[in-house]
């Protein structure tokens, strides 16, 4: 009687890709958390010291420097974007636009703020990149004062300062719970 032996060959490639994706997601999550924590800390200090007008100075001058610092330390491109930008330099590319639209729809369908995370490997210009986004959802005013600069009712002094620094500002009119934008990270593979 002949024995039939079946050999199953498992390719390591799918497991390696999955493991790498998990590592990239974890790393991107840590970078996003560090960026958020540092930016939030600076905004809270400014709000405490000088109210919304002082916080605008942090977003205008310090936020880009914080993003650059985290980019240089991590080797990732780190930033923020939105469908309604305050700074046109933060406008989303096509991939980011699609993800932001998905975040808005997912939020409208009841997903919680912490669930608004998306990542994938994409090809751009013949190169492969790992891309990651984490949604930024407007908190209630009693939790964080973001709505003082991004909400429906902005005081005259704050609006005047925003108009002076951001003549193309679209980042107003939000309500608590809406997707304001996202942290966006990108790493060449």
Image (tube, rainbow, N blue to C red):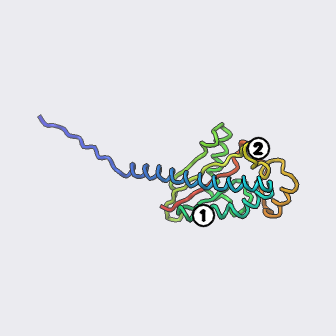
User: Considering only vertical position in the picture, is 128 above or below 182?
Assistant: below
Residue 152 got which mark? none
Q: Are marks 1 and 2 in contact (CB under 8 Å)?
A: no
- Circle 2 crowding by C-alpha within 10 Å: few under 14, some 14–19, many from 20: few
Q: Position of residue 78 (x, y in %)?
A: 59, 60
User: Considering only vertical position in the picture, is 64 above or below 101?
Assistant: below
- Between 155 and 50, the residue placed more toward the observer is 50
- In this view, which residue lies farthest toward the top? 1
Q: Quadrant of the N terminus?
A: top left
Disc 1: which residue: 69
- In this view, which residue lies farthest toward the right? 156
**Which quarter of the figure has residue 159?**
bottom right
Q: Secondary structure at mark 2?
A: loop
Residue ID at (65%, 50%)? 100
Residue ID at (71%, 42%)? 177
Disc 2: which residue: 141
Q: How many marks?
A: 2
Q: Position of residue 117 (x, y in %)?
A: 58, 47
Compared across the picture, whether 67 is left or right of 50 comes to: left
User: Considering only vertical position in the picture, is 176 above or below 120?
Assistant: above
Q: Position of residue 84 (x, y in %)?
A: 73, 54
Compared across the picture, whether 57 is left or right of 10 comes to: right
**Which quarter of the figure has residue 80?**
bottom right
Residue ID at (66%, 43%)? 105
- Circle 1 crowding by C-alpha within 10 Å: few under 14, some 14–19, many from 20: some
- Between 98 and 155, the residue placed more toward the observer is 155
Separation of marks 1 and 2 at Cα, in angstroms: 29 Å
Q: Earlier in the sequence, mark 1 or mark 2?
A: 1
Compared across the picture, whether 162 is left or right of 113 comes to: right
Q: Position of residue 36 (x, y in %)?
A: 63, 53
- In this view, which residue lies farthest toward the left? 1
Residue ID at (56%, 65%)? 72
């Amino acid at each position: 009687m002949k024995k039939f032996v079946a050999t199953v060959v498992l390719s390591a490639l799918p497991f390696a890709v999955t493991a790498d994706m998990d590592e990239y997601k974890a790393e991107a999550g840590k970078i996003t958390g560090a960026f958020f924590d540092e930016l939030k800390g600076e905004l809270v200090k400014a709000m405490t010291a000088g109210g919304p007008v002082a916080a605008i100075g942090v977003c205008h001058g310090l936020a880009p420097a914080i993003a650059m610092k985290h980019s240089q330390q991590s080797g990732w491109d780190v930033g923020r974007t939105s469908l309604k930008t305050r700074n046109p330099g933060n406008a989303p590319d096509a991939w980011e636009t699609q993800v932001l639209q998905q975040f808005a729809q997912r939020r409208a369908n009841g997903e919680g703020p912490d669930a608004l995370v998306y990542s994938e490997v994409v090809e751009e210009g013949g190169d492969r990149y790992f891309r990651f986004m984490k949604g930024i959802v407007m908190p209630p005013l009693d939790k964080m004062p973001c709505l003082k600069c991004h909400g429906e009712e902005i005081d005259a002094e704050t609006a005047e300062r925003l108009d002076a620094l951001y003549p193309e500002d679209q980042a107003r009119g939000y309500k608590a719970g809406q997707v304001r934008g996202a942290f966006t990270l990108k790493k060449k593979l």
